[in-house]
Image (spheres, rainbow, N blue to C red):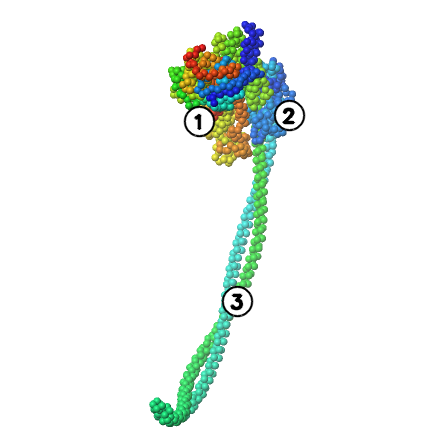
Amino acid sequence: MITPHRLKISNGDGGASLNSVTKNIFREIARTKNRFFSIFTICAIGVGFFSGVRATGSDMKITADNYYDAHELFDLRVMSTFGLTDGDLTALEQVDGVSEVQGSKYSDLVFIYDGRDYNTRVFSWNENAKLNSIDILEGRFPQADNECILNVRKMNGQIGIGEKLVLTDPSDNEDFPLNNAEYTVVGLFDTPMYISSTQRGSTTIGDGSLDAFAYIPESNFTQEIYTEAYIQSEQLKGMSSYSDEYEQLRDDISDKLEELGIDRSEIRYDEVIGEAQQKIADGEKDLEKGRAEGQQKIDDAKAELDDAAKQISNGEADLAKAAEDIADGEKQIAEAKQTLADARIEIDDGKAELAENEQKLNDARKQLDESKTQLSDAKKQLDEAKQTLSDSKRQLEDGQAEIDSRRAEIESGWEKLSEGKKQLEEGRAQYESGKAQYDENLAKYEAGHQQYEQGAARLEQAALLLGENDPQIVAQRAVLETTKAQLDAAKSQLDEAKAQLDEAEAQLTQNEQLIAETEQQLTDGEAQLSAAQEQIDSGLQQYNDGLAQYNENYAKYEDGVKQYNDGYQEYSDGLIKFNDGRNKLNDAERQYNEGTAELAEKEQEFLDGKADYENGVRELEDAKQKYQDGLREYQDGVDEFNKEISDAEKKIADGKKEIEDAGEAKWYVFTRDDNPGYAEYSSNAERIDKIAAIFPVFFLLVAALVCLTTMSRMVEEQRMQIGTLKSLGYSNAVIMRQYMVYAVLAAASGSLIGAFIGMFLFPFIIMFAYSMMYIISNFYYELSPFNIVISAGSMVAAIALTVFFSARNALSGTPAELMRPKAPKAGKRVLLEKIGFIWDRLSFFGKVSGRNLFRYKRRMFMTVIGIAGCTALSLTGFGLKDSISDIVDLQYNSINNYSGFIAYENQDDVQGIYDALLDYQPETEYTRALIKQYTVTSDSGSVQCYVTAVEDTAKFEDMIDLRSRTTGEKITFEQAGGGVIVTEKLTKLLGVKTGDTVTLRISDGNTREVTIGAVTEHYTSHYMYIPEEKYAELFGNAPDYNIVYFKNGMSSEQSVQDEFTTRMLAVDGVLTVTVNSGASSQFADMLKIMDLVVVVLIISAGALAFVVLYNLTNVNITERIREIATLKVLGFYDNEVSSYVFRENNILSVMGGVLGLGIGVALCQFIIQTAEIDEVMFGRNIHPLSFLWAFLITVAFSLIVNFIMRRDLRKISMVESLKSVE
Amino acid sequence: MAFVTLDNVYKRYHMGEITINAADGMTFDIQKGEFAIIVGPSGSGKTTVLNMLGGMDTCDEGVISVDGERIDRFNRRQLTNYRRYDVGFIFQFYNLMPNLTAKENVELAAQTTKDFIPAAEILQKVGLGERLQNFPAQLSGGEQQRVSIARALSKKPKLLLCDEPTGALDYNTGKMILKLLQDTCRIDGMTVILVTHNSAIAPMADRIIRIKNSKVAEIITNDHPTPVEDIEW
C-alpha cells in the first residue's frame, strides 16, 4: 500500500524523494509479482525469439568461416587443359595477394563395392600439404603406397577401415593414371572442399555424379604434372568468407590469375606439343622398321605352306589307287559268297529228298511186317477150323449111336406097360364085388338103427306119461339097451370093411397113375429121339459146308504168302538204293564246308587291306587340317600385321590430329562457390535471415501489445494513487517515472535475459538441424551488441511508449477526478443486438458475454491476435512437416509409378536384363532411358539437372506420372510438342515457364537451346525428359541408354526388395539396382529436422498463447473484480462464476484459432518457399489433420490457462472487493 | 427461538503481529419480520456483522443461526447456497453489472433460483417500470439503488441485508429508499437488517442494535417505530 504521508514533497528536485518513490516502486513490484513477471516473460520470449533467429544467419556464416579458416580451405583453384607444372606453381606464387600455392593431382575413377559403382575422385595425398586440411574421423592417414583414406558420406557405415578397393578407369584413356589399382582403406575423413552431405559434385564418368572421395599417396600418380593448384590468400583469410569484401578481393586476385594463365598456357603448349611431335617422329620410324620385319616373316611362312600343299596332293593320288583295288576285292568276295550259297541250297535239297526216301522205306517195311503177321494168323485159323471140323464129325457119329440104343430101350418099355395094364384090370374087378357086399350090410344096419330110434322115442314119451320108474318102461328100456349094443357091434364091422375098401381103391388109383406116367415117358422118349435124329442130320450138313469153306480159305492163304514174298524182295532193293544216295550227299557237304573256310580267310585279308586304306585317308585329312591351320595362322598373322601397322599408323595419325586438335592451352580459375554446398550453405543462412524478418517480428509485436494492455491497466488501477500523489504536489514526471521504471525494469530484464538465451538457443537448434546436411561443426554464437540493442531496445522502447501514453492520459485529470473511482465503462448495446434472430437465440449469459466482448474491444483484439499467432505457428509447424512428408508420399507413391530401375553398362547385356526381369515376373513392363547430369542455365540461374533420354514415350509415361501439380492433368510428350518436359522446381529455380528457352551445356563450350514444352510435378532432383528423336537432334547421336525402368508390382517389403536386388545384380552387365522406396535416407534426415522444427514452433506457439491468454485474462479479472465479487455475493457457484468469465475467453480462442488457421496457411507458404532447398520441391499442401491439430492445440492451451485462472477466481474475496471503494 | 441469533460471536483479523477483533463477543437476536438497524460509528464492526450474516464472511467463534440453521458451521458450498436462496443484499454502491440493463441485472439474480418474481414486475413495484431497458450508467443513484433492491427481492429471500443503502444518495432519495425498505418489511413481512452509521434513522426500526468497539453496546426494542416520512437528519 502506498504511504503518501511518508513522501517528502520535492518540486522537480527528485534527489531526496527518490528513495521513497524508488521504495514504492520496489514494493509495487513485490506486490504485483505476477504482473511484473508476466511482462518479464513476454518480453523474454519475444526478444529471445527475435534476437535468436536474427542471430542465426550470421552465426551460421561465422561458424562456416571459422571452419574454413581452421581447415585452410583454398580461396581459389586453378586448372589447366594441359595440366600445371612446377614452373606454373612458381609463377602463381609471384602473383600479388597470393600467399600459398599447392599443386594437387586427382583422377576420377570407379570402384565397386557390394555390387554398386562408386564414382570416386582420387586425390594425391601429400603430408606436407597445408591447404584443405582433412579431418580424420576414424583411423589414420595413409602411409604405405597402397593405402587410402575414404569419404563416402552416404554409406559411411558400410565401407569401413580395412576394406580393399580396386580402382578402375571407366574412360577410354589407354593408360591407367595410377601405379597401383588396389588400396586398403585406413581412414575415413571429411574435407572442407565438400561440406555437403547430400551434394558431391559432378564428374565426366559414370552417371555424372560423384559418390566418394579418396586420398592416396602422391607417389601413386603416374603423371608428373599437377591436375590443379590451390591458392590461398592471407588477406582473404582475414575476411569473412561470405562477405562482399571477400568476394571483391577474391575476384581481383582471380582476374590476375587468369591474366597469368594466358602467358603460362602458351609456354606449356609449346612444351607439350614439341614433345608430342618428337614422339610421333620416333613412332613413324619404328613403324617402318616393324613393317619390313613383319613382311619377311610372312613370306617365309607362305613358302612353308606351299610345300605342305604339294605333299598332300601326292598322298591323295596313292589313296585313290588303293581304293580301286579294294573295290575289286570286294566284288570277288561277293561272287564266292554267292556260289557257296547256291551249293548250300542244293545240299539242303538233297538232304530233304533223302529224308523223304528213308521215310518211304520205313513205311514199306512196316507194311511187310504187318502182312507177315496177317498170314500167320490166317494159318492158325485154318488149322483151328480143320480141328473143329474133325471134332464135329466125331460127335455126329457118337450121337447116332446113342440114338440107336435109346430106340431099343423104348421098345422094351412099351412091352412091360401092356403087362401092367392087364394086372390092373383084374384088381378093379375084385374091388367092385367087395364094394357091393359092403353096401348091402350097410343098408341092413341102417334099417335096424331106424327101428331102435323109433322104440327109444316111444319110450321117452311113455316115461313122461307113466314116469321113469314104471316097471314097464324100465323093462322096455333094458330091451332097447340090448338092441343098441347089437347095432354098435354091427356098425364096427361095417367101418372096418369100409377102411379096407378105401385102401384097395387108393392102391388101384396109384397104379393107374403109374401106368399113365410110364406111357407118357415112353411117348416123350420117342419124341426126343426123333429130335435128336434131326439135329444130327443138320450137324452133318454143317460139317460138310465148313469143310468146303476151309478148303476155299486155305487157297486164299496160299496166294497171300506169295504176295508177301514179292514185296519183301522190292523193299530190299529200295534199301540198297537209299544207302547209295546218302553217301553221295555227305561228300557234297564236306566240300561246301571247305569252301566256306577258304572264303573267310580271303575276306579277312580284304578287311585288313581296307583298314590300311582308311588310315591312309585319315592321315591325309590330318595333313590337310594342319595345312588349313597353318594357312589360317598365316592369314591371322597377316591380319595382325596389317592391324598393328594400321593401328600404329592410326596412332600416329591420332597423335598428329591430337596435336592439331589440342588447340590452345587454357587456364580455368575457380572459386569456392564451385564447391558443392558452399554457396548453398550461405543461401541457407540468408533464408534464415528472411524468416527472421517476418516470424520473430510477429512475436515481438504480440509481446509489445500484451505489455501495453497490461501496463495501461496498471495505470488505470492506480488512478487513486496518481491522484493522491498529484494532490500532494508531485510533478507529473516523478509520477510517470514510477510506472516507467516499473515497466522498463520488467521489459529490459526480460528482454536481456531473453536475448541471451535466444541467441544461444535458436542458433543452436537451427545449426544443429543443418548439421545433418553439412559437415560444418563447432557452432559459433555471436552475442552481437547491435542485435541485442535492436531487439531488446525495440521492445523496451515499445513498452516505454505504452506507459508514457497511458500515464499521460491519466495524469491529465485533476487530482479530484483521479481520486474518485473511474466510472466503470458504461454498458451499451452492441451491434449484435440489432440482429434479432441471433441475439434472441442467445442465452442470458450468451448475451452478457457478447456484450462484454464488444465492451472491451482492445482486449478482444489482443486476445484474438495472440491466439491466432499460436494457431498460425502450430499450423506452420505441422504444415512444414506435411510438406516434407508429401515429398516422400507424392514422389515415391504417386509420381514414381515404376518399381525401380537398373543401371547397366553395355547394350549387349540389355536383353539379358529384360529376360531376368521377365523371369522374375512375367508381367513386367520395362523401357530404357539414358540418364546423365548436365548443367542447365537461364538468365536467372543455373541448375544441375538429370537429362533423361526416353526410348519409348508411351511406356515412360506409364513409369513416371507426368502431370501438372496445379490442375492435376496428365501431361504427354505429344502435348509437349517439339519441346522437352522439365520438372517444376527446375523452372522455379531458373525462373522460366512453358514455352521459354533454356541453355543446356552438353560439354565445355558446347551448348544447345532447348524449349520447355511442359512442366511436370516432381519433388526430388531436377529432370529434363527428352524423347529419343529429340535427343538425337540435340546431341547429334542416338542415346546410349544406361537405365532400364521396370514395373512389376513388386511388394514394398524390405526382404522382397533385397532378394530382388541381389538376384538382379547377379545378371551380367547390371551395375546398380534401385528400387522405388520412400524410405530414402535423405528425406528421413529432413523429416527428423522437421520434427525438431515442429516441436520448436509448437513450444513457441504454446508459450505465446499462454502468456497472451494469461495476461489478458488477468487484466480481465482485475478490471471486473467488482462484478465477479457481486456475482459471488449473489450466490453464483464457482463454476458459474468461471464460465461467466471464461466463456469470453473461449469465444475469443475459437475466433483466434480460426483466424490463425488463415494466417498459418500464409505463414507456412512463406516459410516453405524460403526454407526449401534447391534440390527438392516441398509439398505445397497442408493436410486437413494438421488444421485440426493446430486448432486443438490452441484450444488446449486456452483451456489450460482457464484452468489455472480458476484458482485466482476462487481466491477473490467478496468482502475486500466490495469495500474497495470506501 | 429468534429468527436471527448471534451468540458470542468473534471475528479476528491478523495484520502481521497485530490482531484486530472486528467482532468481539457479539450477542443479539432479531425476530422474524422485524426491521432491525445495526448502528455504530465507522470501524465499529457493523459491516463485519453484516458480512457474517450474509454468508460472505465466516466467524472465528460463537454461534450464528438464521431461521434455525447454524450458518457458522456452513462450508463454502453451503454458504454459496445460503447466499443464493436465502439472502438479499443491498450495497452502498449498488454493485450493479454496468454492462447489463436494469431488467437484465434483476434477471441475473433470478437466473440463480427457480422461485422468483419476474424482473419486470418487481421493477414495476420499485417504481422503475419505465426504465427496464436502461443501463446503470443511464440511471440516477436512487434508481440504481432501487434496481439493486429489486434484484435482491426478486429471488424472494428470507432476509434482506442492507449496507449503508443511503450512503451515496442525497437526502430525499435516501428517504425514498428507506421508505421502500420499510414498506417491504411492513407489507411483505420481510425481515430487514440495515447497517448504518447514521443514528438519525434508527427510530424507524423495530429493533436497534448499537455497536461500539466491536461489541454490542445496546439493544433497543422499539414498539412504536417512527414512519420514515417523520424522520429528519
Read off the residue under disc 1. Answer: A970
Among the 4 quarters of the image, the one containing residue A660: top right
- Label drawn at residue A140: 2
Q: Earlier in the sequence, mark 1 or mark 3?
A: 3
Residue A44 visible, this orientation: no
Q: CA distance from mark 1 to mark 3?
A: 120 Å
Disc 1 residue type? Lys
Read off the residue under disc 3. Answer: A575
Where residue A1064 sits: x, y (%)? Answer: 53, 33
Q: Nearer the viewer, residue A958 or A684?
A: A684
Disc 3 residue type? Leu
Q: Residues within 10 Å of mark 1 (few under 14, many from 20)?
A: some
- Label drawn at residue A155: none
Marks 1 and 2: CB-CB under 8 Å? no
Q: Tag 1's secondary structure?
A: loop
Residue A743 visible, this orientation: yes
